[in-house]
Image (cartoon, grey):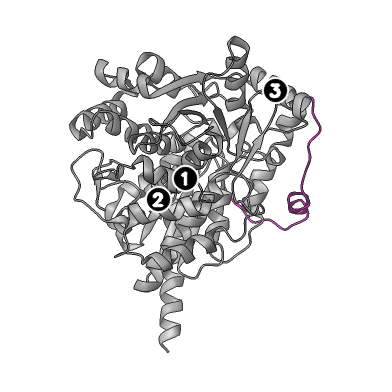
Amino acid sequence: MRYISTRGMAPRVDFEGALFSGYAPDGGLFMPEELPQLSIETLRQWSTLSYPGLVKELCTLFIGPELIPRDVLNGLIDQAFSRFRHREVVHLSRLRNGLNVLELWHGVTYAFKDLSLCCTAQFLQYFLEKKEKHVTVVVGTSGDTGSAAIESVQGAKNMDIIVLLPKGHCTKIQELQMTTVLRENVHVFGVEGNSDELDEPIKAVFADVAFVKKHNLMSLNSINWSRVLVQMAHHFFAYFQCVPSLDMDPLPRVEVVVPTGAAGNLAAGCIAQKMGLPIRLVVAVNRNDIIHRTVQQGDFSLSEAVEQTLASAMDIQVPYNMERIFWLLSGSNSQVTRALMEQFERTQSVSLPKELHSKLSGAVTSESVSDEAITQTMARCWEENKYLLCPHSAVAVSYHYQQTEQQPPSLPRCCLAPASAAKFPEAVLAAGLTPETPAEILALESKGTRCTPMRKGDDWKLMLRNTIEDISCQQRDHFLNALE
């Protein structure tokens, strides 16, 4: 399996190349050169698999046994999921009025990012150990990515991780999950700015190609292909859990509601759809509605500012993974994708070509949800089911409630739940409900913390570069000591 850039100006790479690159050298994102088409027979065979079993099948297709032999791959994936609290890893809760909630949050940090990042870290570790190499991972987070990335690599000898978090813009629990990990290879910065502002120094550092190469830098945010690959399993598992029967031809469809910020889970769903999974996708966003405007009107343009909402991990202006979706729906047309994205980078505003917009609105339905609708949904779900939703999951469930009020569902519907309500006590209180906090999260309060401030007026790019250089010096010292 080979990967090519959505912008068409970079050399082809294998899975290992895509894993370590993040962005392609031409600024695009890596996508598989061709998508395997799954027959009805294959889908029927996969329907009995567990969630880890589906991840293994998908990774086998997209990595290839010549890079990671199948038995080794199976071991890496089993290891990745070994710390999950639920024996199924991912669990479907069937609630009243046809509401199906797919819980993607049974990992260490109580968020869906644990699923893809723990696998990605295992793949990285495998290749690094083979080559006796070290990398420094740099992550900007709006809340959940940072803690999941830290958990997946903390203590690893071949990796250091630097995380920039937006001070005061994520919840107290999200912040503590990052600042209480006192391992030597974890370096956390608290930035006086929002998640888009903290991306600036990271982009500036990655734009210096020689510096990136010299210090073996990589990113683990939602643009990394490995994360999108694992997230495809959410859609297959949702489908098999909710489809009434697989005895028909064609197979019945299931609607999957995807709450999103950077569109990683949505891109994964679009790829699964293209491979032959009969799902209808609905994308649900908060008031930061660039994806909703793009689907409805073809208006891919930034708003004046990021709005702070109760669904804080989705308070994102630039949904990076839409580039993958544009490429996919334009028939892998890298010229169209490159022109669109370069214009967007120049002017922050693009109108999709008519044909592409009609493909997008044919593949995806969308909804934008207010804070008021989020708290109403959380309250209603508790009242009807005694089930607490996090605000991001409530964005998806709000769409379900809105639809069922208009008509009974014509298709089975599955709402993806990206995080546990335990991480968002502030939102639970705003909905007039009582937070339920697990012991592990309560214990964070009494732990020591470590976090370096990046204040307004500081040179954030210089601070980041200096930290990277210090890590490289320490690595050199370790290497020389080992030789003596």
> Residue 237 placed where, x, y %?
51, 42
Counting residues from the start of the chain, the first of labels 3 and 2 encountered is: 2
Residue 209 magenta-highlighted: no
Residue at mark 2: 58
Query: Can residue 169 be seen by looking at this rendering?
Result: no
Residue 152: quarter of image = bottom right
Residue 370: quarter of image = top right
Q: Main secondary structure of the magenta part?
A: loop
- For disc 1, the neighbor class at 10 Å (few under 14, some 14 to 19, many from 20) is many
Using the image, tell me which numbered label, if any, was put on residue 233.
Answer: 1
Q: Residue furthest front?
A: 247
> Residue 130 placed where, x, y %?
36, 73
Residue at mark 3: 375
All told, the count of numbered labels is 3
| Chain part drawn in magenta | 431-452
Q: Nearer the viewer, residue 451 or 440?
A: 440
- For disc 3, the neighbor class at 10 Å (few under 14, some 14 to 19, many from 20) is many
Cα distance between the residues tagged 3 and 2: 36 Å
Disc 1 is placed on an element classified as: helix
Q: Residue furthest bottom?
A: 484
Q: Nearer the viewer, residue 448 or 415?
A: 415
